[in-house]
Image (tube, rainbow, N blue to C red):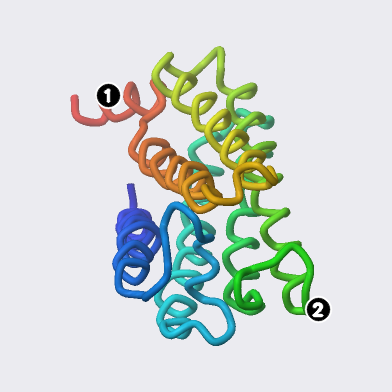
């Protein structure tokens, strides 16, 4: 892995998981299980600027770097490379959250800014689900069972989290469902970036010899 990829993983965990939970615990009336992550950066939120510049923006940039690394890693696997490119939808979602803060409470309908925010979120989850599926389909015969299983499991967690947080019956738990999806993606990026294809291992062993 390049130093840039390692730094991007640290950003993903620090800015994408640790910082939001710390700010969420500090923010009065905020619940990690009941409130969206984007509500921390909503218009009028007490720590909105910190979340936008310390979380949303760095995550979007980190995902771009990690996707580029995966695109190179899937050399010779066109479907998996397409899947990696589709994961750029995640970066679009976070950059959209940076540029278009949601209204207070992040409602389904609201200002034009809220509509653009929601569109970014839709692009993120559709990109993540289709990207993971394409990667799984593209590497299933070449990759280890562990990588294939991790990819399909993450796809299921993202899909479950996405559809459940949109369910009217689950609005009291929408934050928990969103975190299931988002943190599963973060974990998969760590695993996928650290994962080394068998061909790369063989090349490394040959070089060492």
Question: Residue 87: horizontal and vertical position, in percent?
Answer: 61, 47
Mark 1: give few (<14), some (14-19) or many (20+) Cα within 10 Å. Answer: few
The quarter of the displayed image where residue 81 is located: top right
- Asked whether residue 85 appears in the rendered view, the answer is no
Position of 114 compared to 180: left or right? Answer: right
- Is label 2 in a helix, a strand or a loop? helix
Instruction: Please identify the residue farthest to the left as the structure is shown.
Output: 209
Quarter of the image where one finds residue 38: bottom right
In this view, the mark in front (1 or 2): 2
Of residue 126 and residue 79, the one placed in the foreground of this image is 126
Q: Is residue 80 above or below residue 10?
A: above
Give residue 112's mark: 2
Q: Nearer the viewer, residue 129 or 189?
A: 129
Badge 2, how many Cα within 10 Å: few under 14, some, many 20+? few
Alpha-carbon span between mark 1 and mark 2: 57 Å
In x, y percent, where is residue 28?
37, 75
Pointer 1 and pointer 2: residues touching (CB < 8 Å)? no
Q: Residue at x 30, y 60 (%)?
A: 18
Residue under the image location 36 percent in, 57 percent down? 17
Residue drawn at x 65%, y 42% is: 169
Residue that badge 1 annotates: 206
Q: Secondary structure at mark 1?
A: helix
* Number of residue marks: 2
Pick the residue in front: 92 or 46.
46
- Quarter of the picture containing the C terminus is top left
Q: Is residue 161 left or right of residue 108?
A: left
Q: Relative to 92, does residue 191 appear above or below in the rendering?
A: above
């Amino acid at each position: 892995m390049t130093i840039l990829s390692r730094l991007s993983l640290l950003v993903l965990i620090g800015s994408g998981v640790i910082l939001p939970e710390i700010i969420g615990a500090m923010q009065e009336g905020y619940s990690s299980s009941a409130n969206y992550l984007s509500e921390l950066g909503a218009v009028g939120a007490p720590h909105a600027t910190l979340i936008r510049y310390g979380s949303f923006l760095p995550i979007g940039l980190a995902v771009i770097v990690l996707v580029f690394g995966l695109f190179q890693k899937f050399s010779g696997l066109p479907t998996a490379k397409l899947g990696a490119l589709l994961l750029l939808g995640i970066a679009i979602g976070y950059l959209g959250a940076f540029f278009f803060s949601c209204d207070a409470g992040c409602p389904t309908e609201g200002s034009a800014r809220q509509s653009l925010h929601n569109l970014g979120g839709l692009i993120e989850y559709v990109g993540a689900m289709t990207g993971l599926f394409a990667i799984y389909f593209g590497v299933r015969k070449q990759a280890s069972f562990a990588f294939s299983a991790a990819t399909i499991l993450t796809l299921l967690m993202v899909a479950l989290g996405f559809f459940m947080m949109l369910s009217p019956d689950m609005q009291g738990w929408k934050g928990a469902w969103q975190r299931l999806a988002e943190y599963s993606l973060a974990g998969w990026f760590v695993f996928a970036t650290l994962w080394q294809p068998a061909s790369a291992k063989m090349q490394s062993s040959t070089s060492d010899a």
